[in-house]
Image (cartoon, rainbow, N blue to C red):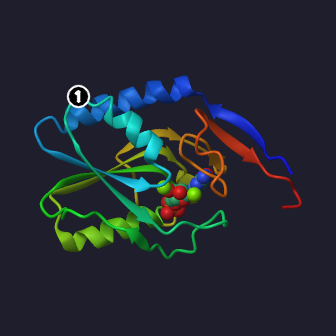
């Protein structure tokens, strides 16, 4: 079985958009210390590119949330399987995500951190699928808004494949899968 991949954003398009987002974030946080929290694994490439375009100096942490495994959809329960080591209390936090889909992952982070007491919380996502939202979560910085399509590449996987690709692709699955 071979998956068919159709490119929707090229490496050049992504790089351009990452520069724009970094400019905006640098402007918004020029007067306050920023802690960037990447959500593993999907955000690792986006985060690496984004932080290198910033003109401010962030600190960087990671969390890992339970994945959907081989399913394409969340069941609504999100577990944190790797937490930050340093407390985020009193910090200005920017969560960096690969994609906001139902919004359940971000919602669970914001619930968890409401108890910690952050100075502020914003969300930056490379991709946004607003049509699929099941929560009131809105990202503050969005690279690209897309239709209800399953995408891979630039950190995003299908069953752990395709994360290494430079562009973003729609996977066209075989009908019998
Ligand atoms: P949410 O909790 O917002 O429904 O889902 C967030 C996570 O689901 C993303 O961080 C990503 O890991 C996964 N996800 C949602 N849509 C897609 C998609 O189109 N492609 C891939 N590869 N992962 C997705
Ligand atoms: Mg993710
Ligand atoms: Mg995944």
The C terminus lies in which quarter of the figure? bottom right
| Residue 36 locus on image (x, y percent) | 28, 48
| Residue 158 locus on image (x, y percent) | 66, 54
Task: Please report the residue visible at 32 percent of the width from the left and 28 percent of the height from the top.
Answer: 53
Task: Please report the residue visible at 50 percent of the width from the left and 48 percent of the height from the top.
Answer: 128
Task: Please report the residue visible at 57 percent of the width from the left and 74 percent of the height from the top.
Answer: 75
| Residue 79 locus on image (x, y percent) | 44, 74
Along the line of sight, the residue nearer the viewer: 94 or 42: 42
Residue 129 in the figure: left or right of residue 111 = right
Secondary structure of the residue carrying tag 1 is loop
Label total for image: 1
Label 1: how many residues lie within 10 Å, few (<14), some (14-19) or many (20+)? some
Relative height, residue 105 to residue 139 (above, below): below
Relative height, residue 9 to residue 114 (above, below): above
- Give the image quarter of residue 72: bottom right
Task: Please report the residue visible at 61 percent of the width from the left and 51 percent of the height from the top.
Answer: 157
Judging by the rendered image, the residue that carries numbered circle 1 is 55
- Give the image quarter of residue 65: bottom left
> Is residue 102 shown to the viewer in this render?
no
| Residue 58 locus on image (x, y percent) | 22, 41
> Is residue 81 shown to the viewer in this render?
yes
């Amino acid at each position: 079985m071979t998956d068919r991949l159709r490119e929707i954003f090229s490496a050049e398009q992504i790089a351009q958009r990452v520069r724009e987002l970094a400019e905006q974030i640098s402007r918004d946080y020029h007067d306050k210390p920023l802690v960037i929290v990447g959500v593993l694994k999907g955000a690792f490439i986006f985060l690496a590119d984004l932080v290198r375009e910033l003109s401010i100096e962030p600190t960087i942490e990671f969390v890992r949330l339970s994945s959907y495994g081989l399913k394409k959809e969340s069941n609504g329960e999100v577990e944190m399987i790797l937490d930050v080591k340093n407390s985020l209390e009193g910090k200005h936090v920017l969560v960096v995500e690969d994609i906001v889909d139902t919004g359940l992952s971000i919602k669970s982070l914001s619930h968890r951190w409401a108890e910690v007491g952050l100075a502020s919380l914003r969300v930056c996502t490379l991709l946004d699928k607003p049509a699929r939202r099941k929560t009131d979560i809105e990202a503050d910085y969005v690279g690209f808004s897309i239709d209800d399509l399953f995408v891979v590449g630039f950190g995003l996987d299908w069953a752990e494949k395709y994360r290494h690709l430079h562009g973003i692709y729609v996977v066209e699955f075989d009908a019998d899968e």
